[in-house]
Image (cartoon, rainbow, N blue to C red):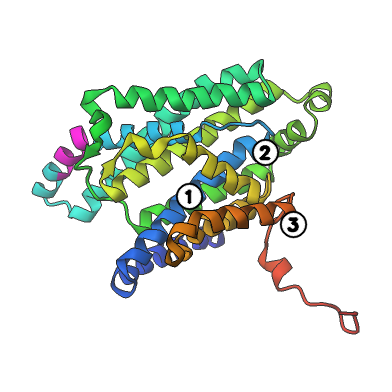
Amino acid sequence: MLRRALGPVALLIALTALNVWLPRAVNPYFYQVLILVGINIILSVSLNLVNGFTGQFSIGHAGFMAVGAYTSAMFSLSVGMKTVAALTRAGVPAWGAEGAMLLVALVLGGLVAAVFGWLVGLPSLRLRGDYLAIVTLGFGEIIRVVILNIDAVGGARGLPGIPHWADFFWVFLGVAVVLVVARNLAHSTHGRAMFAIRDDEIAAEALGVDTTRYKVIAFVLGAFFAGIAGGLFAHYLSYLNPGTFTFLKSIEVIAMVVLGGMGSLSGSVLAAIVLTLLPEVLRPVKDFRMVIYSLLLIVLMITRPQGLLGTSELSWRRLLRRRPAGART
């Protein structure tokens, strides 16, 4: 019991120490890129639950992110900021009051996104492949257009003034949570059922797997974590624009899942890091940046069509494994 508690405690201490040290030691530009890497890891792992685990093809992930971002932002603007002010007047430390309200806002954003995930997951009972992809694409565009036409959330002008409550600690705590949940799911009976659906849905159904239930669960879980990522995005940048959540954002997340390897969690993490850093590394070449970026993606997919890691996972045991003495190199 004590041994199990040591891991989370050590993680919280490490995140707190890095949260204090990084803003002072790292250039603000690099710090922001690091935060975006964390948010993209949450997005790619959450989409992997849908596309990688159960083999469904969803291309509306930006829509779930937008729902979570706007829900959590509106909660903070209407309730959260007033509550923080009241709590600080009552003697509660500002960091504690802001952290508590951010946590509520993120969970609320995730839950509302999960409800939308359930609504979008229902058509997957009847649709597969390209047809399901079109439904999810339509959902993402509907969400974006609705936001564009609601003046209460800023419409096309965007939503400014969102409290800047998210930082390294909260973003990478979110990364740790989504990785733990996804890893435990992958190694559970439920995860095996999802992989069976991905490999052969008819065979899985013949063996008694409730394919409908697992496909909807994957959609709800993926949407929940996409909503969390949206909430973190809103509370870090302090501004939301509907133009952020376009079809291209969904394609960017799909590219991370496919490049990393369908069903591989460490592959999704690796691809999210690579595809977030690559455009920044190529900034010196200016106009040719996106051309080189696209060419590198094409070369990577030709040489590694199964993704960087395929379906395998990185592990310290595998990385540190030594070759037996006398083995050929």
Residue 63 image offset from top left, x and y in percent: 44, 31
Residue 74 image offset from top left, x and y in percent: 25, 33
Any part of residue 79 in sight: yes
For image coordinates 14% across by 38% down, the residue present is 82
**How many marks on residues?**
3
Q: Nearer the viewer, residue 4 or 14?
A: 14
Q: Which residue is mark 1?
A: 40
Kind of residue sitting beneath label 1: Asn
Quarter that holds the N terminus: bottom right
Between tags 3 and 1, which lies in front?
3
- Name the secondary structure under disc 1: helix
Is residue 79 inside the magenta stretch?
yes
Q: Nearer the viewer, residue 307 or 287?
A: 287
For image coordinates 81% across by 23% down, the residue present is 202
Q: Which residue is mark 2?
A: 53
Q: Residues within 10 Å of mark 1 (few under 14, many from 20)?
A: many
